[in-house]
Amino acid sequence: MQQSDSPARRHRENLATEMKAASRVTVIGMILDAFLGIIKIIAGTLFHSQALLVDGIHSFTDVASDIVVLGVMKVSRQEPDENHPYGHQRIETFGTLVLGSILIAVGAALAWENTLRLIEGGIDTVPEWPVLVAAGVSVVGKEWIFRYTRHIGQIIRSDLIIANAWHSRTDAFSSVVVLVSTAGAMLGLVWLDVLAAVVIAVIIIHIGWKFTWDSVQELVDTGLSPDDTEMLKTIARNTDGVLNVHELRSRRMAQDILLDIHLVVRPEISVSEGHQIGMQVVNGMRNALENIRDISFHIDAENDEDQFPPTEKQPSRAEVGRIIAEHLGEIPQRSRLRLHYLKNRLHLEIFLDEPDPDTVFTSENVRRQLESYPWFGSVRIWVAGS
């Protein structure tokens, strides 16, 4: 395969493309957030709208989040290295956690301040019509950037970009609240403006909590849903050659899924056949969930979850060879020894290239010589041509 078509090269190109798209949409959003924030703070201050002023502060939290996103995306999209063999996507998760925490802090401070104003009363300033214009411009602008940012986030599979999109959507929601509250205040319900400021702050807290909780779930390695886990187990069980699946563990890293699975196969098959069965399971799972990044499979000859730890150390191939040579002599040349470690016992298969004229290597004789060993289970002798 040519280097230009290698998976590693394609991965690098994808990372570069994703980083470019994420940076472009974030910079566009940051410029729009700064523009709207300035308009809303000035209009809210000059035309007596506490709700629009809080909404303007909300827009500047979007600017802060955009800066966080730019920094985090640059680091999280780096290639895997020696210290981070699975990549750096968890940095994106941490960035989402920081972004959510910022939203909670800002929302809580604004909610507290405006709740106190409601309790104390004495609200006598009425918002003026320019507040409606500023809020309307904000609704249109933030709804557009929300849709654009979410679209890019879905394409590059970035929770951080999607989270930032929803942060923009909260700004659009809060501007709608400003529109309604300003109209009500101008009709005589002056307190609606401050109440709207509290509602906007609560919206900010709610979105921040969602981002924070989802990030914490990922950072503590929360697995896939029970439905997805059972679906993947079913795919494995239905794969030809798999007798059972006795363990499947999953975790997320940003949008990617990492899996560890134990597959029970027939104990007499070859290592290469067991590996091929595992690869068939991997292909089936990747077809079911496209964002699976890595699958580690372990081939088991038995369900070792139900077995007690061995009471005796099981001998290695070299040790078995020495024991057989001590009791029976060297195994004839061109003959093969196959070992099966099952249920805390060792089962032997000896493949003789030709019949043994001295009848040393017979099932009965080998069994008699080895049955005193606590690890011995059984023996079968196979003779070529018989």
Image: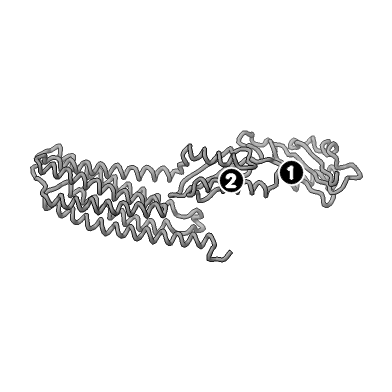
Question: Taking 123 as reference, is 139 left or right?
Answer: right
Please provide percent x and percent y for residue 41: 17, 53
Q: Amino acid at mark 2?
A: Val
Q: Is residue 359 left or right of residue 124?
A: right
Q: Is residue 270 left or right of residue 295?
A: right
List x then y, in percent, for residue 198.
Answer: 20, 41
Please state the horizontal and vertical placement of residue 33, each as a whole percent of the image.
25, 55
At 55% from the left edge and 39% from the top edge, which residue is drawn? Answer: 233
Q: Which mark is residue 281?
A: 2
Q: Residues within 10 Å of mark 1 (few under 14, many from 20)?
A: some
* Disc marking residue 339: 1
Assign a secondary structure to mark 2.
helix
Q: Compute the Cα span from label 2 to label 1.
A: 26 Å
Q: Is residue 138 visible?
A: yes
For the residue pair 283 and 248, the one nearer the viewer reads as 283
State the residue at coordinates (46%, 62%).
Answer: 13
